Amino acid sequence: MLTDKQRPATPRPGAIARLAAEIAAAQAQQPGLRLLLGHGSGSFGHVVAQRYHVQGGIAADADWWGYAETGAAAAQLNRLVTDACIEAGVPVVSIQPSASARCREGELLRMEDYPIRQALAHDLVPLVYGDVAFDEQRGCTIVSTEAAFSYLASQLHPARIVLVGDVDGVYDADPLADTVARRIARITPATYAQIEGKLSGSHGVDVTGGMLSKVRQMVRLVERGHAGRVHLISGLQPGALAEVLLDPDASRGTLIVGAER
């Protein structure tokens, strides 16, 4: 939601600034709130990655320009987000995933977490983002923010994860295309199979699988005990992010939990 996915390299500066301000407000109201932030590449990285088919890999003897251009596009958006957070008073430290990520067949095997742990220990806010990465089999691939979160959650075991997008949670159809789509308020590993077939990809260009991929990864996280819960909300609703950061039980969006409570 930080970019217009229908238009290449088009940020939403107002949305970026407002969300940064909401994060700052939540930290001010709850001193000691430790956060790890992340954002996708939106219409910056995704559009370029699709043009060069970076997600599927590049042969060893092929032109690697697409890898470089995709990484540069992702970093361009990250710079905008970093600057907005600093201006709002959030002490973010940008962490470039491709600097340490190692993948195999599109799966993130490992990523250096020492800088992230150190940032958190010093009351800083590490900021990761969707990025390119080298891949042992494909040559290269894309590491989505959810993939980075999934790996880091297995190392850091956060109490919860909040995913912010265009729509208010998970729906049984694309709410941007179907006016009668219904929101699914709660998902558990036991109920996921019942709704998997109703999920579709994102509205707009997304080379990392859209909503289906996001929900699948998050269900797997809570099922394995790597995160206590996952909350999916809309960032287009002013105040929603700050509310959820301060209240884990806020009745917004969709909540993914390991078991019924």
Image: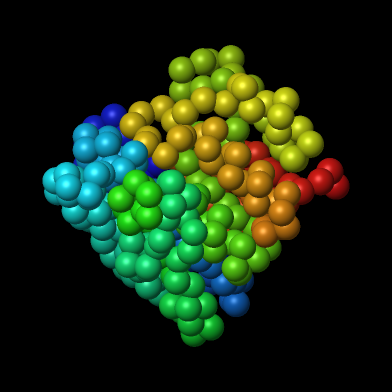
From what the image shows, is residue 142 above or below residue 5? below
The colour scheme used to paint the residues is rainbow
Q: In the rendered view of the protein, which quadrant contains the N terminus?
A: top left
Describe residue 245's horizontal placement relative to residue 63 as left or right. right
Residue at 31%, 43% in the rendered image: 57
Say whether residue 212 is left or right of residue 210: right
8 relative to 73, above or below? above
Q: Is residue 247 above or below residue 28?
A: above
247, 188: nearer the viewer: 188
Placement of 20 over or under 117, stated as above or below: above
Horizontal and vertical percent for residue 85?
36, 64
- Point out residue 7 in the picture as x, y percentages from the top left corner: 24, 32
Where residue 204 sits, quadrant-wise, is: top left
> What residue lies at 68% left-to-right and 30% top-to-bottom?
184
- Asked whether, in this view, residue 258 is left or right of residue 195, the answer is right
Q: Quadrant of residue 207?
A: top left
Task: For residue 92, say whether it is visible.
Answer: yes
User: In the depicted view, which residue is nearer to us: 91 or 246?
Assistant: 91
Q: Is residue 144 visible?
A: no
Q: Quadrant of residue 216?
A: top right
Image coordinates of residue 155 in percent, x first then y, are: 60, 68
> Residue drawn at (47%, 28%), measured in percent from left and top?
201
Q: In the visual, does 51 lie left or right of 211?
A: left
